[in-house]
Image (cartoon, rainbow, N blue to C red):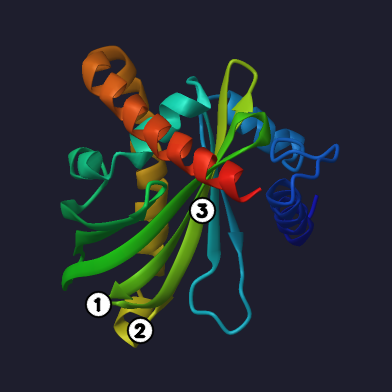
Amino acid sequence: MKKSTHILVLFLWLVGISQNTWGADTPWSTLTASQQETLNAGKQILVTEEIPKATWPRFHIYRLIPAAPRDIEAVFWDVNDDINYVPDCMKVTVDSRPAPNIVEATYYLNIPFLPQEVSQVRTEVTLLPLGIYNNTWTILSSKYSQSGSGSFLIVPHNKGSLICYTNFVVPKSSIACMLRSQAESQIKATVKAIAQRVEYQLKEAPQHHAEQLQQIDAALKTTSKSSAVHE
């Protein structure tokens, strides 16, 4: 499957789940046999989608994690814990929670050869059919980025989960544009760190993880009740 076709199939699949329509394709089935083999070997894969006139491509990173989607989502949703495992993250402050399933937070990140990056990000989580968690995020303000958006999709797969982390950023300056390889490395490191943090929480910090589960359940339960009222 060509890269462009692969991205189109994934896009159509994401549109389908947002509309509660289901076809034969899943994120796993959009991957080639070679990519599936790589994932089954415990490695992650990177697919780059070149965007016309954009300095950086849209990055898609896939990885299998031997944990339930709910456990992974609980770790990802715990923004206050990011400083403990997200690469180059020096500080995180939660600015507001416009809704139970939405959080706006400011991240302070170390950037090679440049002053510290400060960016405010809005993240929203939604529980989709079949136990799929979808997180979408948007950059509200940033020192080095003109705009940015992405998603973190967690899909049940066999006895674990398939995750797909998507990231697309438009840099502000020509200096930032030269850091494409660094950005790619940081994104790959972030996905790897998420997988390692899930494993750590499950094995070494079960009490903290129980609190994380309560947080995500409360956010989505409240959202579900609100949706039911408007139906």
161 lies left or right of 125: right
Note whether residue 194 is visible.
no
Please name the residue that numbered disc 1 is placed on: 143
138 lies left or right of 211: right
Mark nearer the N terminus (2 vs 3): 3
Tell me the kind of residue under disc 1. Answer: Lys
Q: Alpha-carbon distance for marks 2 and 1? A: 8 Å
Taking depth in this image into account, of 36 and 9 the one nearest to the observer is 9
Please name the residue that numbered disc 3 is placed on: 151
Tell me the kind of residue under disc 3. Answer: Ser
Find residue 46 and report its horizontal and vertical position in percent.
Answer: 55, 49
Taking depth in this image into account, of 148 and 31 the one nearest to the observer is 148
Q: Alpha-carbon distance for marks 2 and 3? A: 21 Å
Q: Quadrant of residue 177?
A: bottom left
Mark nearer the N terminus (2 vs 1): 1
Taking depth in this image into account, of 99 and 194 the one nearest to the observer is 99
List the single residue furthest toward the front: 229
Q: Residue at x 27, y 15 (%)?
A: 206
